[in-house]
Image (cartoon, rainbow, N blue to C red):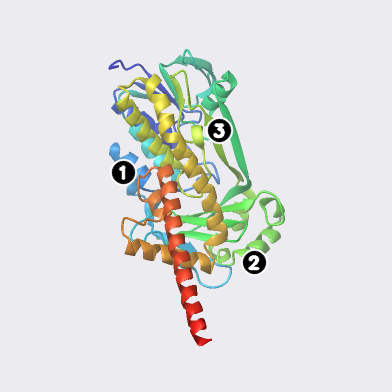
């Protein structure tokens, strides 16, 4: 058994990196946590880049393991379903669970990051270095080069772990070294944030729901904040007649929203200013292989497998990565050369499964949730869950309210749909046979 604890470097002090530092420190490792930004606790959030998180069971499971779940949930707002806003007519609520009491939780990315950073920095065997941008990495020797305000500095670690997001500098260094291949699949869609402030000190919309304005080829969502505001996110095409590129003047912006999001206009007094000055972010899926080189440099979270945000699983999936890596270290007696390949073997199929489900959920949210056919299907699905408790469980519940591996979720849901399809086909055939017999008797 390997009892030696040499320093481990974690590059990226975002959500996954801070959680990873806590888990490694708990195992007795000295941890150096490097972050390219200044300390986020001392500055302001970049405008239009907050993107609320939907924290669900997978993320909460990871937080429970280090005793942070209650602290984090104190500022969370539970959302028990979707509130669908049509262009005309009243909003309609769609429960996430058959019981109606299960919820995903709206939480500020910045607040969660700060809580995790505080927890990591408070540990005696964790040191945090801000303003350190990785510009060089020797995967075999573990030597890192960083650009800092004081110039370039070097550091060495026995293991280097990249938890530095979709644009990972660690992955970039491994790519340049020739240690891996990657694919980046960007959508022809971007995102932009808007804000709905409180009205009279209260929420302008129901805070117990994730609000969706489905518009066919585009959509907007809104999540509640503890200050009683809502953060809205537009997911629109980047080009075309109904895209970010098509609106520029205040009059055009106001006219477009009045036509397509009429109930938003009176609730968003800063709509035009937000639209004109908040940036457009990119959306895409990152895949690479392998996730480790030489048993001493590894990737996890978005650095290894970034996904689009439409299932609310990006952070939850990254947190689950940390739990699985911790489990692999247990099983491999902390031998990193064995644990890192095992981690990829365990998680790669799951990462691909949630990447595909997230893309499919985008189509569902923007195109399907407002349709009568979709609402009927959901009613049938909930009826089956009540009739077959534990045997039939919807994909959404398995993804959001369990820790069933994502790949297992996809396989189970396909089996369920096949059974339901066969039953439905049998019922139709039986009905058709009865009608045919009745017609035959009439003849």
Secondary structure under the numbered disc 1 in the rendered image: helix
Residue farthest to the top?
141
Across and down, in percent, residue 238 comes to 67, 48
Left or right of 419? Residue 269 is right
Secondary structure under the numbered disc 2 in the rendered image: helix
Across and down, in percent, residue 214 comes to 56, 61
Please tell me which of labels 1 and 3 falls first in the chain.
1
Mark 2 vs mark 3, CA separation in Å: 37 Å
- Count of numbered badges drawn on the protein: 3
Residue at (44% x, 39% y) in the render: 350
Q: Quadrant of residue 285?
A: top right
Across and down, in percent, residue 8 comes to 39, 21
Q: Which mark is residue 167?
A: 3
Given residues 71 and 314, the one toward you in this image is 314
Q: Kindly check if marks 2 and 3 are in contact, taking CB atoms under 8 A apart as contact.
A: no
Given residues 74 and 421, the one toward you in this image is 421
Q: Kindly check if marks 2 and 1 are in contact, taking CB atoms under 8 A apart as contact.
A: no
Q: Quadrant of residue 368?
A: bottom right
Please tell me which of labels 2 and 3 falls first in the chain.
3
Secondary structure under the numbered disc 3 in the rendered image: loop
Residue that mark 1 sits on? 69
Mark 1 vs mark 3, CA separation in Å: 28 Å
Disc number lying in front (2 or 3): 3
Left or right of 43? Residue 239 is right
Q: Which mark is residue 259?
A: 2
Mark 2 vs mark 1, CA separation in Å: 42 Å
Q: Quadrant of residue 86?
A: bottom right
């Amino acid at each position: 058994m390997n009892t030696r604890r040499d320093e481990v470097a974690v590059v990226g002090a975002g959500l996954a990196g801070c959680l990873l530092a806590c888990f490694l420190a708990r195992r007795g490792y000295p941890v150096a946590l490097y972050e390219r930004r200044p300390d986020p606790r001392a500055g302001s959030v970049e405008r239009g880049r907050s993107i609320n998180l939907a924290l669900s069971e997978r993320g909460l499971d990871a937080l429970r393991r280090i005793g942070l779940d209650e602290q984090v949930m104190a500022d969370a707002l539970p959302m028990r379903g979707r509130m669908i806003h049509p262009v005309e007519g009243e909003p309609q609520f769609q429960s996430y669970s058959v019981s109606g009491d299960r919820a995903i939780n709206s939480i500020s990315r910045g607040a969660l990051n700060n809580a995790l950073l505080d927890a990591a920095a408070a540990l005696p065997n964790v040191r945090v270095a801000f303003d350190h941008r990785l510009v060089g990495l020797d995967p075999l020797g573990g030597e890192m080069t960083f650009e800092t305000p004081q110039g370039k500095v070097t550091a060495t670690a026995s293991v280097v772990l990249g938890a530095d997001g979709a644009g990972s500098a660690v992955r970039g260094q491994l790519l340049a070294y020739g240690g891996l291949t990657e694919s980046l699949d960007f959508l022809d869609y971007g995102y932009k944030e808007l804000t709905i402030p409180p009205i009279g000190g209260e929420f302008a919309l129901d805070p117990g729901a994730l609000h969706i304005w489905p518009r066919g080829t585009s959509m907007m969502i809104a999540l509640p904040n503890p200050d009683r505001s809502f953060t809205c996110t537009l997911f629109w095409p980047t080009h075309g007649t109904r895209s970010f590129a098509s609106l520029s003047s205040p009059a055009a912006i106001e006219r477009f929203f009045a036509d397509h999001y009429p109930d938003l206009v009176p609730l968003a007094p800063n709509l035009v200013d937000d639209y004109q000055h908040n940036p457009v972010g990119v959306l895409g899926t990152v895949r690479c292989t392998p996730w480790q080189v030489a048993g001493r440099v590894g990737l996890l979270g978005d650095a290894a497998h970034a996904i689009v945000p439409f299932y609310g699983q990006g952070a939850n999936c990254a947190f689950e990565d940390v739990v699985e890596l911790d489990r692999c270290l247990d099983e491999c007696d902390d031998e990193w050369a064995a644990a890192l390949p095992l981690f990829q073997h365990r998680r790669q199929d799951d990462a691909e499964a949630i990447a595909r489900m997230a893309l499919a959920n985008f189509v569902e949210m923007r195109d399907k949730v407002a349709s009568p056919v979709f609402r009927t299907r959901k009613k049938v699905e909930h009826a089956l869950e009540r009739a077959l408790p534990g045997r039939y469980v919807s994909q959404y519940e398995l993804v959001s309210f369990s820790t069933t591996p994502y790949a297992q979720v996809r396989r189970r849901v396909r089996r369920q749909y096949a059974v339901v399809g066969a039953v439905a086909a049998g019922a139709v055939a039986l009905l058709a046979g009865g009608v045919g017999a009745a017609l035959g008797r009439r003849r």
